[in-house]
Every structure is written in structure tokens, then in C-alpha cells.
């Protein structure tokens, strides 16, 4: 009962406001305003939100044109024109409006000319700052297309009512949009942008529904069939889409690998969808499916098996994590190959090559590990070894050797760091050191080790 009474009271206030606006507008058209003996210095402020909820609002140029006409008719003195494209939903987020308030506070302006009160404020914070300036008599007058507001209790109250009404409209829009989305998904209609393979179709009753994209839907079906029936991997199908089919979305871009795998996991293609995402609320779509549920399940199973299938034991190689491809900037990986001879001997070969992570068509050539070691040894000859932090490593090793001799052998070591050729020690590490020692040595070089067309450089 009390709630209904409040609604009736609000409607009555709005009716009174509308009557006041009509009478006030008529008076403005025929009678120029007279605020005080001091001529008011106006700032023309035009604002247009970039958000879709203000599609019906006048453009900034249209607002300025209309307000200049009113200024000429009413002989208003406009000092400056300010304009911005920004939403007024949140307080203190508009830089131009904040500057306008500062200019009023400093006395540059004492009047504002704008299209409507909601151009100034749609939130309580900005409205409070505006009214506070009026209370301090720094803001004498606000002129809009249909109303005039001066520093009087009734007109300030009317200004606050109109701006509060604009805030109420904003708050209701969010509720109404969510209600509309719920109604749409309950009808089986997808409320967002259609997935790749579908396009929007506008019916005679102005309602949009999704229909199959005649160019992309058949290819989407082939994608699922190649994984399910032909045993193709996801990456292989993705390369086929990009290289052979030149498949692009409606935005005319190729699918990234991540988006491709998300496409494969989209339930929408067999007629079901979840909205909102991760809400656990599922709906049967009214759209025509591209694939069957059985085909979708088979693809998920194959993708899972490809991901979880046992891989051969990953063997670590000494120089894979410290070199970079000199052509495309990708990392360097290694392949191990064995050659079996007729006499029973087995020869092992290791080749280092580009991972092609950044460029799958990288032409960088692979290099044999023996040739790689020889080039790294030559780098040690050309390098200023004195700046290499490996000296500290060598010093620690010498101290350990001395301690070993004194503790277990009872003798004092005669060797010192000065007696060791650090350059030869670095070469020894490259040939006979452990994997961690080799990586530590090259990591001390303070520059990237590049591999480009079988040549190593820093």
C-alpha cells in the first residue's frame, strides 16, 4: 500500500514538472531572461554519451547549433564552448565537466548553457557539486532548451528532481535490459553476437533470429568431421583452415589457435547454450544446429585423447633454454637421432633447430651439436672472459678443492685461482660439464646467444 502511494506521488510530481516545463518554455520563447544587473558569463556545455543507451540523444554538433540559436535569441553572453563524449552515470569521471566546475569555482563562468539537465548530471555526486556552487552564489544561472534554473529554492529543487529522474532512468535501463535478455534466452534466442557459422536475420516483426551462414557453416561442419572421423589433430585442422581454406570470420580475420579450440568446445553448434557464461543455466536454442550432439561428443573425446596421450620421455638438452632463433625470435629445441650400422654400431646425433613458435614458416637451418660446441668454444676465445661472473664459480671450486685436501688428505693445496686459465676452464665446462654447468656458463655471458643459419653469435 505504501509502495503504491509512493508511485502515485512520483507520477504526480512528474506531471507537475511537465506542466511547469511547458509554461516556462513558452515564457522563454517570448520574454528574454533577466537574471541580475551583472551580465552572466555562460559556458556552453554539450555532451553525448558513447554508449548505446543514448542513441536517441542529439549529437554534440546538433546541441551546439540549437543552444547557439537560443543564446542569440535571449542575448546570452557565451564565453566558451566545452564538449565531451562521456557517460554521466558515474560521479567524477568526466574530465571536461570537472574542469567546468573548477572554472565556475574560480569565477571564469557564472552561468551554464546546455541542452537539458541530464547533460550535466545523471548521478548524485555531480549534481551535488553543481548545486553546491549555486548555494555559494558562484553559479548564478543554468539555461537549458526548455527550462531556466537560478539560485532559488524552487528552481534548485526542480533541477534536482529532473537530474534524479535521469538517474532513475539509467538504473531502470539496466534492470530492463537484463529482463529482456532473460525473456529472449527463455525463447531459445541467443542474445549476443552470433558465433562463427551463424548470421543475424531480421524478421518482419523487427525481431532478430540467427540463421546459418551459407559460406562458413559447411566449413565448420567439416572441421568437426575431420577431427571426429579422420583423426586429425586440432592444430592440423587449424592449419588447414588457415592455409587451404583461407577461412575468416565476419570481421575478415583468421581464427587464432586459442579461438579455434574455443570454437570446438562451443555447445551452440549442436543446439544448446549457457547464459550467462558459467551460470549453469542451459537453454535449448531455437536456431538450426550445424552438427549433432554425437558428433560434438566424439570431437571432445578425440581432443581429450590427443591432449592426454602418453608422450615419449622428454629428454633435456644442454643448450635448448639459453639460445634464441636469430630469424624469428623463437626458442631453440633439439632432436635426437640414432643411426644403426650393419656392424651393430649405433651413432647418436643431436640437432638444434628453431621451435617456430612465433613463425611456423621460419627457414632457420638446424645445426649439429658437435658443430655448435666448436663455435661456442671459438666464442670463448673472442670473449672478454674477465667480465664473466664464472670467475666467482671457479674461485669457489678452488676453495672446495683446498678444503678437500686439508680435511681428507692432510695436505695443503698449492693451486690458486690465478693459476687457472679461465678461458680453458670455460671450454672444459662446454665439453665435459654437466647440463646445469653449461647453461650456467652461457647464462653468465650477459647477452643472448643467437642461432642463425648454422651460425652462433652473441
Image: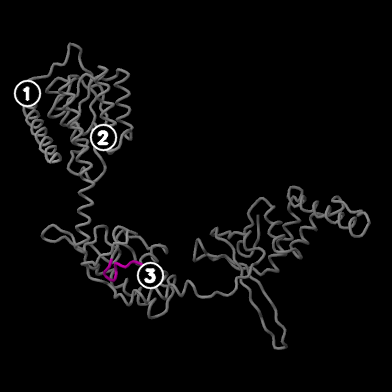
Reading the image, the residue beneath label 2 is: 123
Q: Residue furthest top?
A: 37
Mark 2 or 1: in front is 2
Report crowding for label 3: few under 14, some 14 to 19, many 20 or more residues within 10 A (C-alpha). Answer: many
Vertical placement of residue 36 versus 367, above or below: above
Place residue 275 in its image quadrant. bottom left
Q: How is the image coloured?
A: one colour
Tell how many labels.
Answer: 3
Q: Secondary structure at mark 1?
A: helix
Reading the image, the residue beneath label 3 is: 241
Reading the image, the residue beneath label 1 is: 27
- Check residue 266 for magenta coloring: yes
The structure residue drawn at horizontal position 26% and vertical position 32%, both measured from the top left corner, is 124
The first of marks 3 and 1 along the sequence is 1
Highlighted range, magenta: 265-272
**Residue 368: percent from the left, percent from the top?**
66, 70
**Cα separation between marks 2 and 3:** 50 Å
Q: Secondary structure at mark 2?
A: loop
Report crowding for label 2: few under 14, some 14 to 19, many 20 or more residues within 10 A (C-alpha). Answer: many
Vertical placement of residue 103 versus 261, above or below: above
Q: Residue furthest right?
A: 411
**Cα separation between marks 3 and 1:** 69 Å
**Residue 229: percent from the left, percent from the top?**
38, 80
233 horizontally vs 32: left or right:
right
Amino acid at each position: 500500500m505504501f509502495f503504491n502511494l509512493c508511485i502515485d506521488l512520483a507520477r504526480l510530481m512528474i506531471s507537475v514538472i511537465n506542466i511547469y516545463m511547458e509554461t516556462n518554455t513558452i515564457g522563454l520563447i517570448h520574454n528574454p531572461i533577466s537574471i541580475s544587473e551583472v551580465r552572466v558569463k555562460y559556458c556552453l556545455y554539450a555532451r553525448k554519451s558513447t554508449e548505446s543507451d543514448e542513441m536517441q540523444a542529439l549529437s554534440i554538433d546538433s546541441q551546439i547549433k540549437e543552444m547557439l540559436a537560443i543564446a542569440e535569441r535571449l542575448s546570452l553572453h557565451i564565453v566558451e564552448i566545452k564538449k565531451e563524449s562521456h557517460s554521466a552515470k558515474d560521479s567524477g569521471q568526466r574530465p571536461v565537466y570537472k574542469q567546468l566546475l573548477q572554472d565556475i569555482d574560480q569565477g571564469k563562468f557564472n552561468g551554464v548553457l546546455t541542452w537539458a539537465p541530464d547533460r550535466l548530471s545523471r548521478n548524485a555526486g555531480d549534481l551535488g557539486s553543481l548545486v553546491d556552487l549555486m548555494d555559494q552564489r558562484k553559479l548564478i544561472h543554468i539555461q537549458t532548451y526548455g527550462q531556466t534554473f537560478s539560485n532559488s529554492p524552487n528552481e534548485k529543487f526542480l533541477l534536482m528532481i529532473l537530474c534524479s529522474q535521469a538517474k532513475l532512468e539509467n538504473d531502470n535501463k539496466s534492470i530492463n535490459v537484463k529482463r529482456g535478455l532473460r525473456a529472449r534466452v527463455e525463447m531459445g534466442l541467443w542474445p549476443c553476437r552470433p558465433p562463427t557459422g551463424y548470421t543475424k536475420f531480421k524478421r518482419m516483426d523487427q525481431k532478430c533470429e540467427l540463421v546459418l551462414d551459407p559460406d562458413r557453416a559447411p566449413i565448420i561442419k567439416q572441421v568437426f568431421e575431420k577431427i571426429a572421423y579422420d583423426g586429425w589433430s586440432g592444430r592440423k585442422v587449424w592449419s588447414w583452415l588457415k592455409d587451404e581454406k583461407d577461412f575468416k570470420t565476419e570481421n575478415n580475420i583468421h581464427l587464432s589457435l586459442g579461438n579455434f579450440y574455443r570454437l570446438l568446445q562451443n555447445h551452440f553448434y549442436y543446439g544448446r547454450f549457457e547464459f550467462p557464461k558459467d551460470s549453469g543455466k542451459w537453454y535449448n536454442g531455437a536456431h538450426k544446429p550445424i552438427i549433432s550432439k554425437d558428433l560434438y561428443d566424439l570431437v571432445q573425446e578425440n581432443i581429450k585423447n590427443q591432449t592426454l596421450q602418453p608422450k615419449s620421455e622428454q629428454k633435456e638438452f644442454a643448450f635448448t633454454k639459453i639460445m634464441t632463433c636469430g630469424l624469428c625470435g623463437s626458442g631453440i629445441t633439439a632432436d635426437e637421432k640414432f643411426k644403426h650400422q650393419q656392424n651393430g654400431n649405433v651413432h647418436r646425433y643431436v640437432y638444434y633447430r628453431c621451435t617456430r613458435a612465433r613463425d611456423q614458416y621460419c627457414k632457420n637451418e638446424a645445426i649439429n651439436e658437435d658443430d655448435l660446441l666448436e663455435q661456442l668454444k671459438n666464442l670463448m676465445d673472442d670473449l672478454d672472459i674477465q667480465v664473466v661472473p664464472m670467475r666467482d664459480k671457479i674461485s669457489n671450486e678452488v676453495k672446495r678443492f683446498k678444503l678437500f685436501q686439508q680435511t681428507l688428505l692432510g695436505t695443503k693445496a698449492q693451486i690458486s685461482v690465478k693459476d687457472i686459465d679461465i678461458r680453458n676452464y670455460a671450454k672444459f665446462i662446454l665439453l665435459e660439464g654437466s647440463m646445469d654447468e653449461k647453461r650456467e656458463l652461457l647464462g653468465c655471458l650477459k647477452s643472448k646467444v643467437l642461432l642463425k643459419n648454422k651460425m652462433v653469435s652473441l
